[in-house]
């Protein structure tokens, strides 16, 4: 192999070690692998986007309804009631967009952070466990709010619960950083929606940003939402990949 490399690339390679020559020889293979990954991602992202959007469209309002039933959120323009579910006609598409954005971003992280390794595999068990944890967490926050627990006490309880959820469901530093980003960005993203379109508001807000009231501990709800969307997106990717293999 070294002889072939010497004749193919010239005299300077004579001064390179065997380890360096092996690295040079492996570069084209890595390039092919990267192109293959990009090709796979480009072929599957439309299906994954639709699956994530549909999950948020139908599942999201049901989870969100746990908060609206205790009047944490009051809906305004476009409010609808479907039995015990209080929501807004814009909530399903907005949550579909939320699921799709966070899920696809996680899949990009999986590809970019470990370019030479296969992306983490998802499973139905992990997705189900993270969904159950999310529902229990949202229900806990709703019950504490309904019972009139002081905001600071509820925040302490929920921040501790969010840390436990991360330890049980993720434990990765990247996952923690991503959950923090989602937890901070999403409540702030609600501000222009509430101000411009008057779709909902928080009747007992305890903090104000840009003239709009928010509830501080909702950060923890978005934080716990993130491990669920990570596991959901990875499981959907596994399903799509398996379907593509069967078609071949």
Image (cartoon, rainbow, N blue to C red):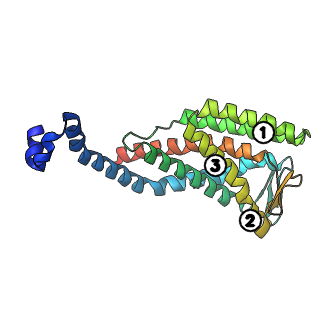
Residue 227: quadrant of the picture? top right
Say whether residue 168 is left or right of residue 216: left
Residue 94 in percent (x, y) is at 67, 59
Instruction: Tell me the element at label 3.
Output: helix
Structural distance between the alpha carbons of marks 1 and 2:
27 Å
Determine the residue positioned at 63% across, 30% down. Answer: 167
Say whether residue 91 is left or right of residue 130: right
Work out whether residue 59 can be spotted: no
- Residue topped by disc 1: 139
Say whether residue 42 is left or right of residue 6: right
Report the front residue among 3 and 40: 3
Report crowding for label 3: few under 14, some 14 to 19, many 20 or more residues within 10 A (C-alpha): some
Determine the residue positioned at 23% across, 35% down. Answer: 19
Structural distance between the alpha carbons of marks 3 and 1:
23 Å
Determine the residue positioned at 41% across, 56% down. Answer: 42
Q: 239 above or below 41? A: above
Q: Nearer the viewer, mark 3 or mark 1?
A: 3
Q: Nearer the viewer, mark 2 or mark 3?
A: 3
- Residue topped by disc 2: 192
Work out whether residue 79 can be spotted: yes
Report the front residue among 197 and 206: 206
Determine the residue positioned at 28% across, 49% down. Answer: 32
Say whether residue 76 is left or right of residue 61: right
Q: Earlier in the sequence, mark 2 or mark 3?
A: 3
- Residue topped by disc 3: 181
User: What is the residue that sits farthest to the right in this orientation?
Assistant: 148
Residue 29 in percent (x, y) is at 25, 45
Structural distance between the alpha carbons of marks 2 and 3:
18 Å
Q: Earlier in the sequence, mark 1 or mark 2?
A: 1
């Amino acid at each position: 192999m070294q002889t072939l490399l010497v004749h193919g690339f010239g005299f300077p390679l004579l001064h390179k070690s065997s380890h360096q020559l092996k690295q040079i020889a492996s570069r084209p293979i890595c390039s092919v692998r990267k192109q293959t990954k990009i090709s796979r991602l480009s072929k599957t992202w439309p299906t994954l986007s639709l699956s994530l959007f549909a999950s948020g469209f139908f599942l999201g309002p049901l989870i969100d309804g746990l908060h609206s039933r205790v009047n944490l959120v009051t809906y305004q323009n476009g409010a609808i009631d479907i039995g015990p579910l209080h929501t807004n006609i814009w909530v399903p598409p907005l949550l579909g967009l939320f699921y799709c954005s966070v899920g696809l971003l996680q899949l990009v992280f999986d590809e970019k952070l470990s370019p030479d390794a296969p992306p983490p595999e998802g499973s139905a068990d992990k997705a189900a466990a993270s969904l159950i944890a999310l529902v229990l967490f949202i229900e806990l926050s709703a019950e504490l709010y309904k019972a009139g627990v002081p905001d600071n006490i509820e925040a302490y309880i929920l921040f501790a619960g969010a840390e436990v959820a991360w330890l049980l469901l993720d434990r990765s530093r990247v996952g923690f950083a991503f959950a923090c980003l989602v937890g901070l960005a999403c409540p702030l993203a609600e501000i222009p929606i509430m101000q411009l379109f008057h779709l909902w508001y928080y009747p007992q807000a305890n903090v104000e940003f840009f003239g709009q009231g928010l509830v501080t501990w909702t950060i923890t709800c978005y934080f716990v939402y993130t491990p669920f969307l990570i596991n959901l997106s990875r499981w959907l990717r596994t399903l799509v990949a398996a379907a593509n293999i069967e078609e071949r």
